[in-house]
Amino acid sequence: MRSSLTLVGTLWAFLSLVTAVASSTSYFLPYWLFGSQLGKPVSFSTFRRCNYPVRGEGHSLIMVEECGRYASFSAIPSLAWQMCTVVTGAGCALLLLVALAAVLGCCMEELISRMMGRCMGAAQFVGGLLISSGCALYPLGWNSPEIMQTCGNVSNQFQLGTCRLGWAYYCAGGGAAAAMLICTWLSCFAGRNPKPVMLVESIMRNTNSYTMELDHCLKP
């Protein structure tokens, strides 16, 4: 089984898969921001949350210790986080699409040419840029009432208060940076240049095949 990728291209495909999986997994996990509320640990991503308060008997607040996404897009605490959800999700989808094509290129001949590899690298740069933009938008939502309740009522835009950033936030940003810088550069050398000799041989084989079929049809 021949590959359409060079040795550098194989490394590019592997790193593309790693960065795409790292960014996408971090996008779905609610561990971007850690804080506490009513003495219980609380964590957030852009559209998910772990542990949330509800009204119990006697109208007192109790913490429900479970993770889940917000009931609707409009229920996400701030406009910045809504934008972050869309932008980061689009970037992750783009990185996953390129990674899938790169992995297929390891198994299929003549799938990824040198020019195609560079185009895929450009798509990775755009995907990484979208995820990075999402990470930059994320702190703009720290002044929402829901986040302030979790961060000691002292948080603000780009001010965490008593909260701290989680590992998933750094993982998403690191995956985006690796996709933009390393994968984009490696993609320039990922595909194989088409060989003119192979192209001529392919044309000759097709011509001979058509000639044989024509002779067979013309024979009485």
Image (spheres, helix red, strand yellow):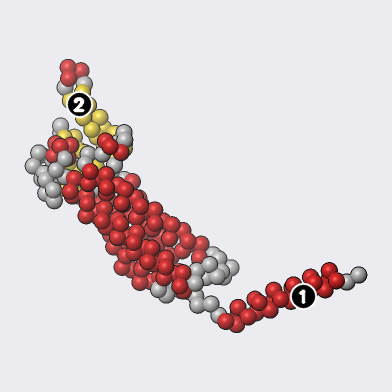
Q: Is residue 113 above or below residue 40?
A: below
Question: How far across and down, in percent of the image, does residue 74 sit?
Answer: 28, 37
Q: Secondary structure at mark 2?
A: strand
Is label 2 or label 1 in front? Answer: 1
> Which sits earlier in the primary sequence, circle 2 or circle 1?
2
Return the mark for residue 211.
Answer: 1
> Quick one: 38 or 147, which is closer to the camera?
147
Residue at left 50%, top 77%?
193
> The C terminus is located in which quarter?
bottom right
Q: Which residue is mark 2?
A: 62
Residue 43 place in picture, x, y as percent? 23, 41
Q: Nearer the viewer, residue 89 or 53?
A: 89
Q: Position of residue 46 (x, y in %)?
A: 27, 45
User: Nearest the camera: 152 or 220?
Assistant: 220
Above or below, 13 relative to 71 = below
Residue situated furthest bottom in the rendering: 197
The correct choice, above or below, for 11 with respect to 27 in the image is: below
Q: Is residue 164 left or right of residue 184?
A: left
Looking at the image, the residue that sits furthest to the top is 58
Q: Quadrant of residue 184?
A: bottom left
Hey, what amino acid is under mark 1?
Answer: Thr
